[in-house]
Image (spheres, grey):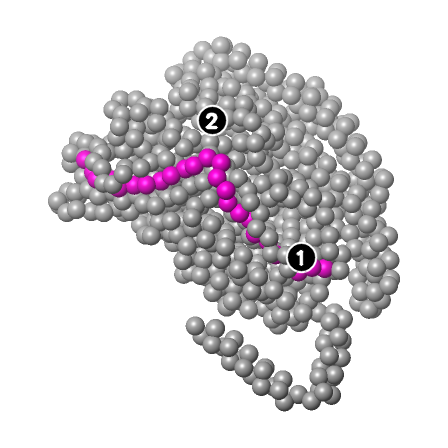
């Protein structure tokens, strides 16, 4: 209400002032407005309009939309997500953004309404445990009684002698150091369990023993799972122990997944002089729990930058797009790549043309918390040099980021920027991935406004707003291909190539020759952009326009080469880490060779504990049935690309060691390992053939990239 009355009072003041204006005054004002519209707004003027309180208030206001009254949740395609999107759309229009657009996309929706479990403690007291949810179907249709059993870590061995049919299975889990939630959940599902209740035992939710956790399920919707706090689990385990691992509880839960539903991405623009060239700012608006940092604050920050640009009168050269994305946390059922669904659909299905028009994407995640003493910007390889040059221009704020700013590469898969980058848009984001926050508050009910750091919010609004302005001053996107080529060269392990009878020298020579061309192109890109900035600074609009027009084809060629590099050189491990193509087979060969050497020395424990688990998806062969292992392997190798989204074609194969690992687990050090060594030898040969094939493909791809760079 205060804001409304403030605006009303201002309107009355303006009205009375206008009444007192003379005709001469009006003429002076008109001339002043014309002059102001042609003035260049500086970074300082932009920063003077940055309002971190606005960003906070808007972020906090998103919590009003929820599907679960006790816990929050604004998830893919749910009514709460739809309401949040409409709220953002309204704000974009209120800020005066142009062409505010609502883009329809198709996702699998999830609505989590409740999961209340009550039981009698050892003292006879009735205890209510409010549970978190995962993206699965489970509806008790009111309170219903279930038997609960405790199954330790939920492995095949843990469940083997338990009768879990129709029961709730309580397990402990550490999703960072052991396995993802889908494996024990599906193992229990195959044995007929009604649902799994997971208790975080480290890895996530470490902030407090009352913390719940939510993650993407990466599994089928008919294998239900929920999250229980350690605090409630302690009491439940005590009661189970007292009753010989048999206890009846009352459960009232409703979690609903629906396939192929509609939700919406929203964007508004500040239209630039070159209206069809873009700088894209983005953040997602779906969330678990309150989601204050992840990702309410990102939306507040993004719109706060838009507001400061509008309030300062900034007139960009390129159109700046502010894109609020749905369904980042989850949006497609039964896929390993079930997150970043909104961004993937936006750039690959709704606006694929953006990929050829966008100079840069700046994506925001968890931006109002000081995750580390060093402020990290995670970037595609090609922007590292530009960002390194930009760092000294960022004004420091006392009390935060005492170790300054660091650029880290490459982009990883944890956020929407990866989807934009593989589409061909050079992208960055504020980094959070290696922070303690990920272990403590991330995806828990403790991700609330208590985590808010006002200084960090202001710092990031200043930094990323002025970074967008820095990109806007470039005539061509400031890509340097040398960084990627350097890192690719470093990743080649010649020893592995030699022992595999694969020619590494040709690849290394091609990389070296291509780097020479790339260095020359770096200089040309920098020279063009320096001339453009100089013309702008001098107010020489005619010269700036000439430089811009003259280099349009260069910009198009730079983006085309970047897209080729993303297509040819970005692959994923089975743990979703970004690698170069040759690293898949190279890393497998190294691990298999180490395992073989250990077995030849009679050290089965060394082979199992230090090597074999590193090969593809074989970590899960250690603890789960073949059916579970195959299910989650095959849904990567044998699923349609439309279900795999941004992961389609990025994993380069799978070496099945399930039987070898099972055989070795049954043996002790010093046993006869002839059969297993023979199987490992066969796997090595397969991977060596893959390395040879990959090497040939990479040589051709590097040559093709060099031709693209030479043509510029």
Residue 173 visible within the image:
no
Q: Position of residue 263 (x, y in %)?
A: 50, 45
Q: Element at badge 1? A: strand
CA–CA distance in space, label 1 to label 2: 41 Å
Side of 315 where 308 appears, left or right: left
* Dominant SS type (magenta): strand
Name above or below for residue 88 compared with residue 614: below
Q: Is-magenta flag for residue 249?
A: yes
In the rendered image, the quadrant that contains the N terminus is: bottom left
Residue 539 visible within the image:
yes
**Which residues lie in the magenta part?**
248-272
Give the mark, 1 or 2, whose residue is nearer the N terminus: 1
Relative depth, front residue between 170 and 289: 289
- The quadrant holding residue 46 is bottom right
Q: Residue at x 55, y 48 (%)?
A: 265
- The quadrant holding residue 351 is top right
For label 2, the crowd category at 10 Å Cα-Cα, with few meaning under 14, some 14 to 19 and many 20 or more, is: many
Q: Residue at x 78, y 52 (%)?
A: 476
Q: Element at badge 2? A: helix
Relative depth, front residue between 269 and 207: 269
For residue 632, the mark is 2
Q: Position of residue 561 (x, y in %)?
A: 76, 40
């Amino acid at each position: 209400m205060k804001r409304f009355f403030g605006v009303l009072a201002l309107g009355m003041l303006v009205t009375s002032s206008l009444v007192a204006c003379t005709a001469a005054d009006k003429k002076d004002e008109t001339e002043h407005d014309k002059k102001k519209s042609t003035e260049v707004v500086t970074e300082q003027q932009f920063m003077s309009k940055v309002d971190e309180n606005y960003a906070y208030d808007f972020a906090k206001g998103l919590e009003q939309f929820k599907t679960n009254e006790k816990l929050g949740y604004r998830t893919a395609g749910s009514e709460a997500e739809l309401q949040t999107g409409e709220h953002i759309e309204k704000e974009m229009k209120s800020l005066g953004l142009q062409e505010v657009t609502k883009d329809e996309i198709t996702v699998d929706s999830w609505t989590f309404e409740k999961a209340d479990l009550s039981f009698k403690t050892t003292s006879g007291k009735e205890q209510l445990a409010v549970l978190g949810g995962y993206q699965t179907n489970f509806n008790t249709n009111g309170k219903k009684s279930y038997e609960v059993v405790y199954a330790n870590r939920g492995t095949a061995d843990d469940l083997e002698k338990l009768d879990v049919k129709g029961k709730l299975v309580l397990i402990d889990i550490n999703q960072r150091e052991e396995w993802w939630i889908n494996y024990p959940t599906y193992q229990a599902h195959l044995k007929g369990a009604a649902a799994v209740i997971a208790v975080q035992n480290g890895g996530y939710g470490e902030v407090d023993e009352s913390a719940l956790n939510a993650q993407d399920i990466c599994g089928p919707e008919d294998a239900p799972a929920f999250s229980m706090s350690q605090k409630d689990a302690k009491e439940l385990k005590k009661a189970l122990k007292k009753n010989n691992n048999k206890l009846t509880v009352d459960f009232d839960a409703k979690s609903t997944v629906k396939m192929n539903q509609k939700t919406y991405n929203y964007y508004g623009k500040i239209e630039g002089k070159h209206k069809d060239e873009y700088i894209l700012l983005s953040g997602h608006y779906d969330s678990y729990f309150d989601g204050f940092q992840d990702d309410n604050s990102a939306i507040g920050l993004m719109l706060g930058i838009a507001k400061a640009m509008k309030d300062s009168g900034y007139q960009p050269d390129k159109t700046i797009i502010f894109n609020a994305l749905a369904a980042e946390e989850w949006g497609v059922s039964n896929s390993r790549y079930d997150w970043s669904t909104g961004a993937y659909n936006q750039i690959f299905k709704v606006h694929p043309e953006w990929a050829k028009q966008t100079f840069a994407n700046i994506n925001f995640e968890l931006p109002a918390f000081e995750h580390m003493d060093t402020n990290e910007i995670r970037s595609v390889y090609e922007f590292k040099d530009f960002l390194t040059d930009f760092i000294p221009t960022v004004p420091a704020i006392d009390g935060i980021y005492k170790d300054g700013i660091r650029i880290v590469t490459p982009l990883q898969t944890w956020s929407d920027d990866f989807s934009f980058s593989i589409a061909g848009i050079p992208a960055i984001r504020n980094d959070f991935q290696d922070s303690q926050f990920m272990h403590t508050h991330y995806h828990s009910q403790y991700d609330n406004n208590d985590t808010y750091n006002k200084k960090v919010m202001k710092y990031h609004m200043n930094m990323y707003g002025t970074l967008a302005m820095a990109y806007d001053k470039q005539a061509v996107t400031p890509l340097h291909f040398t960084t990627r080529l350097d890192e690719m060269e470093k990743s080649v392990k010649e020893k592995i190539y030699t022992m595999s009878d694969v020619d590494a020298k040709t690849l290394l020579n091609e990389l070296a020759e291509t780097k020479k061309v790339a260095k020359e192109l770096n200089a040309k890109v920098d020279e063009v952009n320096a001339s453009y900035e100089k013309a702008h600074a001098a107010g020489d609009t005619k010269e700036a326009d000439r430089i811009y027009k003259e280099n349009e084809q260069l910009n198009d060629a730079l983006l085309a080469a970047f897209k080729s590099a993303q297509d040819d050189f970005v692959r994923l491990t089975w743990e979703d880490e970004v690698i170069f193509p040759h690293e898949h087979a190279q890393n497998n060969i190294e691990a298999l060779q180490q395992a073989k050497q250990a077995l030849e020395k009679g050290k089965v424990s060394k082979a199992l504990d230090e090597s074999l688990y590193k090969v593809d998806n074989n970590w899960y062969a250690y603890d789960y049935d073949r059916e579970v292992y195959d299910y989650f392997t095959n849904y990567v190798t044998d699923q349609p690309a439309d279900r795999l989204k941004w992961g389609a074609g990025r994993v380069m194969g799978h070496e099945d060691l399930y039987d070898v690992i099972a055989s070795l687990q049954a043996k002790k050090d010093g046993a006869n390992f002839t059969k297993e060594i023979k199987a490992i030898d066969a796997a090595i040969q397969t991977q060596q053939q893959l390395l040879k094939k990959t090497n040939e493909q990479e040589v051709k791809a590097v040559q093709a990239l060099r031709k693209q760079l030479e043509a510029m």
